[in-house]
Amino acid sequence: MITMNDIIREGHPTLRKVADEVSFPLSEEDRELGIKMSEFLKNSQDPELAEKYQLRGGVGLAAPQLNISKRITAIEIPNMEEEGGEPFLSTVMYNPKVLSHSVQQAAIEEGEGCLSVDRHVPGLVVRNAKITISYMDQDGEKHKLRLKDYPAIVIQHELDHLNGIMFYDHINPENPNYAADDVLLIQ
Ligand SMILES: Cc1nc(NNC(=O)[C@H](CC2CCCC2)CN(O)CO)c(F)c(N2CCN3CCOC[C@@H]3C2)n1
Ligand code: NI
């Protein structure tokens, strides 16, 4: 199983690389990797397992964070309304790409963190409020997804990892908590 020891930290060059597309049909290795990335996220959201294996909570994970420079990301966004309900989005995306995005921007009010960053970096990470993405699933099926608010932010954070971008690259160095009036702040 994947643990925190498998996650590379800022300063590791792989986090600054543009990751390679994966080819289809998927190799057994790439299929297995996706499954293990999802399993990590699910474990990290289980209080007992997170405690037992000292996992930091995660809703997304990108292959470059495992020192694997491939365009693969696992997403595990729980249902915000009901505890224990079906997750809002639970999937592994291969070769995800942004097809279009809103002019409207948004940011998580309390800022962002990253499993590859062992420090708190305060500041607003301003991103697109809405995005339309396409991706391949493990069976080679193509999907198109329109996302907004919190899920859109999560996906953009992961897509950044596939392009060697860290969340703090988006923080205004002069005034980290600055965001134009029209930037949606997400709780
Ligand atoms: C927002 C949030 N970020 C958590 N961590 N950071 C991450 O996921 C990083 C990616 C996120 C950082 C901001 C946007 C994407 C990982 N990244 O570095 C991958 O590139 C959380 F853990 C978390 N939640 C809420 C849901 N909760 C359900 C029950 O279990 C605990 C869990 C905690 N919400
Ligand atoms: Ni991250």
Image (cartoon, helix red, strand yellow):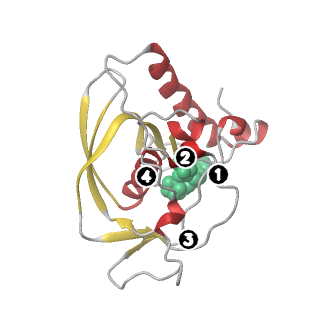
User: Does the CB distance between marks 4 and 2 fall below 8 Å?
Assistant: no
Q: Earlier in the sequence, mark 4 or mark 1?
A: 1
Q: Quadrant of residue 141?
A: top left
Task: Assign a secondary structure to mark 4.
Answer: helix
Task: Assign a secondary structure to mark 2.
Answer: helix
Marker disc for residue 15: 2
Residue 115, percent across and down? Answer: 62, 49
Instruction: Give, as a three-letter code, the residue at label 4.
Output: Asp
Q: Is mark 4 within 8 Å of ligand 2?
A: yes
Q: Mark 3 sits on what residue? A: 110
Q: Quadrant of residue 103?
A: bottom left
Question: Is the residue 183 above or below the residue 66 in the image?
Answer: below
Q: Mark 4 sits on what residue? A: 160
Instruction: Give, as a three-letter code, the residue at label 2.
Output: Leu
Q: Mark 1 sits on what residue? A: 11
Q: Nearer the viewer, mark 4 or mark 2?
A: 2
Q: Quadrant of residue 137?
A: top left
User: Does the CB distance between marks 2 and 1 fall below 8 Å?
Assistant: yes
Q: Residue at x 55, y 42 (%)?
A: 14
Quarter containing the N terminus: top right
Instruction: Give, as a three-letter code, the residue at label 3.
Output: Glu
CA gap between label 1 and label 3 equals 24 Å
CA gap between label 3 and label 2 equals 23 Å
Task: Assign a secondary structure to mark 3.
Answer: loop
Question: Is the residue 35 above or below the residue 6 in the image?
Answer: above
